Structures are given as C-alpha cells and as structure tokens.
Image (tube, rainbow, N blue to C red):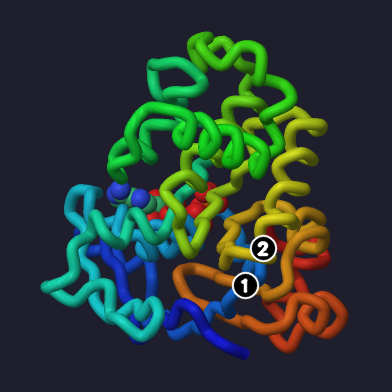
Amino acid sequence: MAECISIRNFNVAFGNTLVLKNIHLDIPCGQITAIMGPSGCGKTTLLRSINRFLELSDHVTIKGEILIDGQNIYDPQVDPIDIRSKVGLLAQRPFSLPMSIIDNVAYGLRIHGMADGKDLHRAVRHYLEMAGLWEEVKDRLREPAVRLSIGQQQRLCLARGLAVEPEIILADEPTSALDPISAQNIEQRLLELREKYTIVLVTHTVRQARRLADYLVFMYLGEMVECGEASAIFSNPQHELTRAYLHGAIG
Ligand SMILES: Nc1ncnc2c1ncn2[C@@H]1O[C@H](COP(=O)(O)OP(=O)(O)OP(=O)(O)O)[C@@H](O)[C@H]1O
C-alpha cells in the first residue's frame, strides 16, 4: 500500500481535554478512506488536522506529525496556506461565495493567476463537469450561486475545490445535509474522483461507508481502534468495538 498521508503520535487537546490520543495511521493514495465512529469520537478533529484547519480553533493544542508525500505539514517552516491548497475540504453544508456560479469556480483559478478569457471559461466548464453540475447550470452561469438548490451548491463547492487542483480531498459528512438524490449524486462524484485523488471521508452511516470505502478507520473515544481494507473489516472486524458499531450496538 502506498501511503499518501502518515499520521504519527498525533494528539489533540481542547483546553485540558484530550480528544485525539496518540493516533498512528497510514492513509493510502488514490483510494477512499472512510473514518467512522460514534458521535464525539474525534473524526472531524482528525480530518481538520490534515489540512491544518484545526489550529484555527481556540484553546487547541496539537502534538505529533502528519506527513503528506513524506513532508511533516506541522513543520514550522511549512505555510498552512500551501497545505490548504493541496488538501481541499468539502464540508457538511455547502458554503457558496456571494457571487455568481461562474465566479465561484473561477475564484480559485484567478487566485492562481489565470486571466479572464476563453481558457478560464474552459477551465470552469471542466471543473463543473467533474462535479456533475455543468448540464444543470450551463445556461445560468451568471446567476447568483445562492439560487441553486443545496445539493447543487454542494456540487458547486466540489467544483470550486477541484479548481485549486488539490491532491487530497477531505469530505466531512458531505451528504448529511442533502436529500437522498443529491446525496447519491455526491457519492457518485466521489467514486469517480478517487481515480485521481486521495479522498478521506468522515461518515456516520455504515451503509455509506460500505458503498464508498476502500479503506476503513474506526475510532472510539479519541483513539484509533482498527484500520484496514474496508472489505476485510466489514466481513471480519478484529476488534469487539468495531463489531459492535457495525452491528448498531453502539453509535
Ligand atoms: N473547537 C472545539 N472546542 C472544544 N471542544 C471541541 C471543539 N471541537 C470539538 N471539540 C470536542 O472534541 C471532541 C471530538 O469532536 P469531533 O467533532 O471531532 O467528533 P466527531 O467524531 O466528528 O463527532 P460527530 O460525529 O458528532 O460530528 C468532542 O468531545 C467535541 O465536543
């Protein structure tokens, strides 16, 4: 297994409360890794550690290393802005910028120095197609993004994130605010994107993990209990806590 993200002796505390305890984990490249576990076990905290969003929280103490392509992203010389352009985040709820549909996607392209014109328009179309939204918005690109449905806005956020050309996509329960059809649409996009990206998905639903995950991480009370090939864990979990969670006995 070629690991893309290596987490070593990783601890996080909010104030005096330790919420991630000595996490040691390798996340494989070019696959979907699902992080599962009961509410409050630290899934989002772990996810937000991977793009250094976590340090924006108050009273947080972070110890340990996260290596991406062999580089410790917590090295003092590393600029968090660089990490955040390499590691995109798809949040629970879509956050459309208060501008047009086209400008939402062009935003990142312009930051990267692309001038307005045909190339920019072509690139916007490309990322909207990757996010499965182009056909629905191609005739209304200049309309405010907020007029789109929540499901469409989530795909717009995906397109905006892809436009920055990340290597890794973090998805924090990206379908939890969506209707079933929109949720299915996002799941389909993630399955298509894993060809090209490493995807780390936090999910509450075992069924979603079954549909999407190649690799599985099970957490409990801030600890990483079990990780491995999803098919192996689903058919034969090694730890009693994982088994209980998969059977709905804890949750
Ligand atoms: N900014 C914060 N300040 C203080 N405590 C926090 C903060 N963020 C998270 N926590 C605490 O850290 C623990 C882990 O939270 P986290 O959101 O990572 O869990 P989770 O597994 O993602 O939960 P859920 O499935 O409910 O979203 C919880 O006890 C939570 O209350």
Q: For the N terminus, which image quadrant?
A: bottom right
Please name the residue that numbered disc 1 is placed on.
Answer: 30
For the residues labelled 2 and 1, say whether their Cβ atoms are less than 8 Å apart: yes
x then y, percent, for residue 187: 74, 48
- Distance Cα–Cα, label 2 vs label 1: 6 Å
Residue at point 51%, 47% (across, down): 162
Q: Name the residue under label 2.
A: 194
The amino acid pointed to by label 2 is Arg
Q: Horizontally, is 80 left or right of 176 in the view?
A: left
* Image quadrant where residue 97 sits: top left
Left or right for 57, reference 85? left
Query: Callout 2 environment at 10 Å: few (<14), some (14 to 19), or many (20+)?
Result: many
Dot 2 or dot 1, earlier in sequence: 1
Label 2: element kind: loop
Q: Quadrant of residue 149?
A: top right
Q: Nearer the viewer, residue 42 or 231?
A: 231
Query: What mark, if any, has residue 214 been given in the picture?
Result: none
Taking the spot 81% from the left edge, 56% from the top edge, the residue there is 207
Q: Mark 1 belongs to which amino acid?
A: Gly
Indicate the position of residue 177 as horizontal and vertical percent values.
Answer: 63, 32
The answer to whether residue 95 is visible is no
Residue 10's quadrant in the figure?
A: bottom left
- Name the residue located 72 percent from the left edge and 21 percent from the top edge: 136
- Identify which residue, 3 or 100, lies in the foreground: 100
Whether residue 235 appears in this view of the structure is yes
Mark 1: give few (<14), some (14-19) or many (20+) Cα within 10 Å. some
State the image coordinates of residue 203 (x, y, percent, origin top left).
Answer: 64, 54
Q: Nearer the viewer, residue 126 or 37?
A: 126
Image quarter of the C terminus: bottom right
